[in-house]
Every structure is written in structure tokens, then in C-alpha cells.
Image (cartoon, helix red, strand yellow):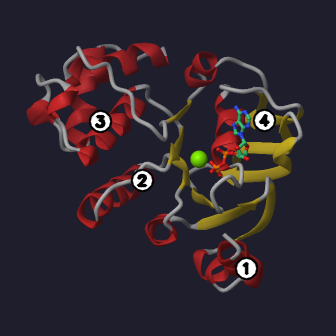
Amino acid sequence: MTVLEGEQLTKRFGGIVAVDDVSFAIDRGETVGLIGPNGAGKSTLFRLISGVQEPNEGTVYLDGNDITGLSPHEICHRGLVRTHQIVRPFETLTLVENAAVGAEFGGRDVDDPEERAHEVLEFVGLDEMAHTTPDELSVGALKRLEIARALATDPEVLLFDEVAGGLDTEETEAIVDLIGDIGDQGKTVFLIDHVMRALMSVSERVFVLDNGSLIASGTPDEIQNDRRVIEAYLGE
Ligand code: ADP
Ligand code: MG
């Protein structure tokens, strides 16, 4: 059953067509990867879905409801949250306060934001540092805090934009494991990664964007052997 659907989405910036007539559908509980060269339109597509930018054309459906043009807050309230490519925690708040803000922002019947905050910090392996501030965290731990803040909103659908970007192998593996655990909980995950290898190991299906257009979709195996995909990457 489809939980998230994009129908003929287009986003232009002046003469640039960042997202060009993109249609897709993702089933509830699926983990889907989105790859493509730099500038392909991946982050823009996520911004259209999460309400940060409005498409020039096209429609986004969540649970069958048109959410196009709703605010990120309203979309979060309906159960879809995204993480940011560049993480920006509240520097003066502790980790538990950062996560609690997520729980409150989500507005999804989280009884006790602080309790929820501890739960999600525990889940990402940061609860021991709950009362420290983000400046004490490594890059990998900051990414896990970003995931915790997203989880605190009690989402059904999570969009991760390059959540493993800039991490070393060990940190990347920790994030990949975490995304696998989130998928195992029955959540729907849509994730962008520029590094194909990490994403391929957790994704059931992969979409490929090139120049704003969806040029391929399939299992990780199919995608890795797709000539158009290989060409799009070699042409970088
Ligand atoms: P990706 O995430 O795949 O690297 P982006 O979605 O960031 O790609 O960008 C797609 C294209 O849209 C690029 O050519 C980029 O320069 C352009 N673009 C993205 N955001 C803006 C913006 N706010 N104003 C102008 N051009 C933009
Ligand atoms: Mg991007």
C-alpha cells in the first residue's frame, strides 16, 4: 500500500529545472534509496516532499492526502519528517532538550516529550550524553542526534538527506545499522546518499535522478548494473 507518492513534480529555479516531471510511489514500510550525481535534484525533491519548497507543478500525497504546499510543520504533524544535509542542532540546549524540541515540534500526541527524548537518544546510542551540549559530539554523533530529533516527532515516514555524508567507515556503518533498525520497526524510509555502497546495503529499492529526471528505479542489483546509471555517474 502506497504511503508516499509524487505525481509529475517539477521545480524550476530561473532557467534551471532542478526537478523535472518526477513521479514515484513508495509503499508503507519500504526503505528506498535516492541516488544521482551532484546537482541531480535530490535535495530539491526532498524539499518539495517535506514542504520546504513548493513545486511549480505536480502533487505530493501522504497516506493518499494531497500535502502539496503545506508547511513543514503541518507535514511533520501528519507523520513525515526529514533530516538536513547540514545538521544544525540548538547549540545551547542539551541533547535531551534538543530531542524534546523535536517531540514538541512534531505535535503528534507525544505524552511526555522528555521521556520520548530519552527513548530516542537511547535508540541512537546517545542517552549517556543526554545532558551534554552538541559541541561535545563527534561528526558521527551529531548525525545520530539529527536522527534522534527526527524520530522524536514520532514519524511514519523519514527522509534522510546524506545522513552519512562526511563520515568515516565506522561512523557510516553505525548510521547504516541505525537506518536498518528504523526500517525494521516498520517505518518508511526514503534516503539520499551520494556514496552508493552504504545506501545499497539498506535499500530495498533505489531511484536514480540525473539532471532532474528519474532515469531508473529497481533493486540495488538492477541499479548497479544499469547502463544509464553507470553513464550518469561516469559523466560526472
Ligand atoms: P543534489 O541534492 O542532487 O546535489 P540539488 O537539489 O541541491 O541537487 O540541486 C539541483 C539543481 O538545482 C542544481 O543545479 C542546483 O544548483 C539548483 N538549485 C538548488 N536549489 C536552488 C536554489 N534555491 N536556487 C537556485 N538554484 C538551485
Ligand atoms: Mg543534496
In the depicted structure, whether residue 59 falls above or below residue 194: above
Ligand 1 sits in quadrant: top right
Say if disc 1 is inside 8 Å of ligand 1.
no
The residue carrying mark 4 is 60
Query: Which quadrant holds residue 213?
Result: bottom right
Q: Earlier in the sequence, mark 3 or mark 1?
A: 3
Measure how far apart labels 4 and 3 are at the Cα level.
28 Å
Tell me the kind of residue under disc 3.
Leu
The answer to whether residue 2 is left or right of residue 30 is: right
Residue in the picture at 68% in, 52% down: 39
Q: CA distance from mark 3 to mark 1?
A: 36 Å
Q: Bin the neighbour count of mark 4 within 10 Å (Cα to Cα): few under 14, some 14-19, many 20 and up.
A: many
The kind of residue on which mark 1 rests is Glu
Q: Secondary structure at mark 3?
A: helix
Query: Which residue in the protein does label 3 denote?
Result: 145
The tag earlier along the polypeptide, 4 or 3, is 4
Label 4 element class: strand
Where's residue 91, x and y in %? Answer: 26, 20
Q: In the rendered structure, which amino acid carries the disc numbered 2?
A: Gly
In the picture of the structure, the residue carrying the numbered disc 2 is: 165
Q: Which residue is mark 1?
A: 231
* Camera-side mark, 3 or 2: 2
